[in-house]
Amino acid sequence: MPKLNWKKKDEKHTQKFNISQDVSEFQVLESNKNPVIGNNNFNEDLLKVKRSQSHEHKKKLMDWNNLLIWGENISILRSLIPTFSNKIKLIYIDPPYATGGKFESKTFIGEGKTFEKKKAYSDIWDGGIDEYIEFLYERLLLMRNLLSEKGSIYVHLDWHVSHYIKVIMDEIFGKENFQNSLIWAYPAASAKTRRFFIRSFDTILFYTKSNDYTFNDDPEIYMEYSDRVKFALKEDEKGMFYYRGGSHNGIRLSQKVYITNKGIFPRDVWTDIPYIRANTMEYQAFSTQKPERLLKRIILASSNKDDIVADFFCGTGTSLAVAEKLGRRWIGSDIAKQAINISRKRIFDVWNSNDLMDWKKKYLRRAQPFEIMKTNDFKQIINIHKDFLVKNIGNKDVISLIQDSKFVVQISKKGSKITVDLVDFIVSNLNLIKERVKDKIRIFTDWIDSWSIDFNYQEHSFTTAWISYRTLKNRKLSLTSVPYNYEEKGAHKISIKVNDILGNETIQDYDVFIT
Ligand SMILES: C[S@@+](CC[C@H](N)C(=O)[O-])C[C@H]1O[C@@H](n2cnc3c(N)ncnc32)[C@H](O)[C@@H]1O
């Protein structure tokens, strides 16, 4: 079988690549288990009761938390192997595509429509295509290890590199395990060129680990009938609709083909899923965000309820939100703190997102418990995005001064109940922040994107008990927490976390005593 060669391929590793090297411990940064949501549009009574759970389902979920992992995914993948080798049913990845471009996202400020654009991630490879292929190759090897025997992997790419990656996928997963080169076409694509045809599709490579893999013929994945079929429909004497079609050995049969309302079993060209638009509920103002409908088809086809679905380049968390709503367990990771912050809020706010089975309705269920983690070897001191800072300060010490922001709260006690009010937020070293950003700040709350409270803080592990967060569609922040009732008398520690628009987290602890 022909194989692809690139610089460094044989120098560093082959299929024998040592996957047990450099395993790091995971550190839990935040645990989230049904926190009280303090947003003004949240109403517990609106939520649907939990689906009834079978004994087997309960057992599977007993010790399980979904995982959102911040960091470099090569180290995350290696560190997942001891626990998750052969356990993940479906991997979807939408990595950088070696486009040579920089992708933007918008950070909205305060309650209005003001925003700041900033770089979301860079897709520039100094070592050219060789470096890119090497990058993906070593990660795909690790992903193959994590995939269960009945598992599938979908790699989302475009014209830049899909042909190269197809060849390395054949090498890693086996040519015989190739299932589809899916074309996701978005005809509304626009470009100024008149020198070649406008590029308007992505390629999603679908491979399985073996020949015995999960693939569901679920009506929810079906495509709508084409216009050609719809125009040709005729009604029979019983009121059933059909068209004439079908062929055998090149001979047209003109048989009656009856249609059902579920549409047709999907072909490998998907034209029925539009690109994300700014007026949709799912829009996260992140330029490479993918539509939930796309992930719905993939996840329903290639996994079952409670299976583990993973996305190691999760961006805004599209695949995680869809896996959540379809009752799958999920693992997501991203190197950008901003992507982790967006995914975190998206999961908290999942109750308020589209119901995938009835698009006009809201999902109206809480997210299953999830943890935010990082690997111990991942040390990123600078969270503040450079785009927010005045030019020419690359010095870490200077940047860490801004990270020393402070906030002021008022803690009120009434019997065994504690309420917290957020009354001020002070960014240190304001002179290091761009005038353009500062000009957009009118009141202290404009700095804040979300804030949360752990009323029973145990050293090193923040458990969200209450949170208020801004979303793109609901910019209001609650400044007063819901009263928290302590059942136990004595000393307690409260930890309060403020996530600001610069990308920083400021955490302060307080002691309370209940008599
Ligand atoms: C194309 S975007 C994913 C968009 C996502 N599918 C969505 O719907 O929002 C690629 C993501 O990969 C992340 N990324 C790039 N290199 C990474 C690495 N080495 N480890 C983890 N994440 C990485 C980027 O930060 C970016 O968020």
Image: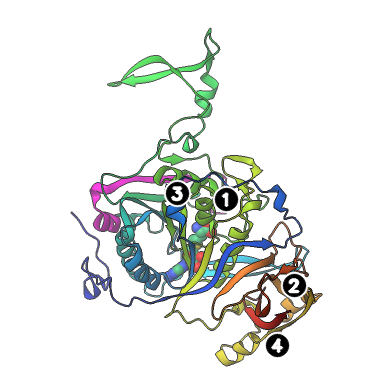
Residue 189 horizontal side relative to residue 453, left or right: left
Residue 186 belongs to the span the image colors magenta = yes
Please say if 203 is above or below 333: above
Look at label 4 and name its amino acid.
Ser
Ligand 1 has an atom within 8 Å of the beta carbon of the residue at disc 2: no
Foreground disc of the pair 3, 2 = 2
Q: Which residue lies furthest to the top in this view?
A: 237
Q: Which mark is residue 416?
A: 2
* Bounds of the magenta segment: 167-193
Q: Are marks 3 and 1 in contact (CB under 8 Å)?
A: no
**Percent from the top left, x then y, of residue 98?**
42, 64
Foreground disc of the pair 1, 4 = 4
Disc 3 to disc 1, C-alpha distance? 46 Å
Please say if 199 is above or below 405: above
Q: Residue furthest left?
A: 1
Residue 502 quadrant = bottom right
Q: Which of 364 and 137 is in front in this view?
A: 364
Disc 2 to disc 4, C-alpha distance? 35 Å
Foreground disc of the pair 3, 4 = 3
Q: Name the residue under label 3.
A: 57
Q: Mark 4 points at which residue?
A: 428
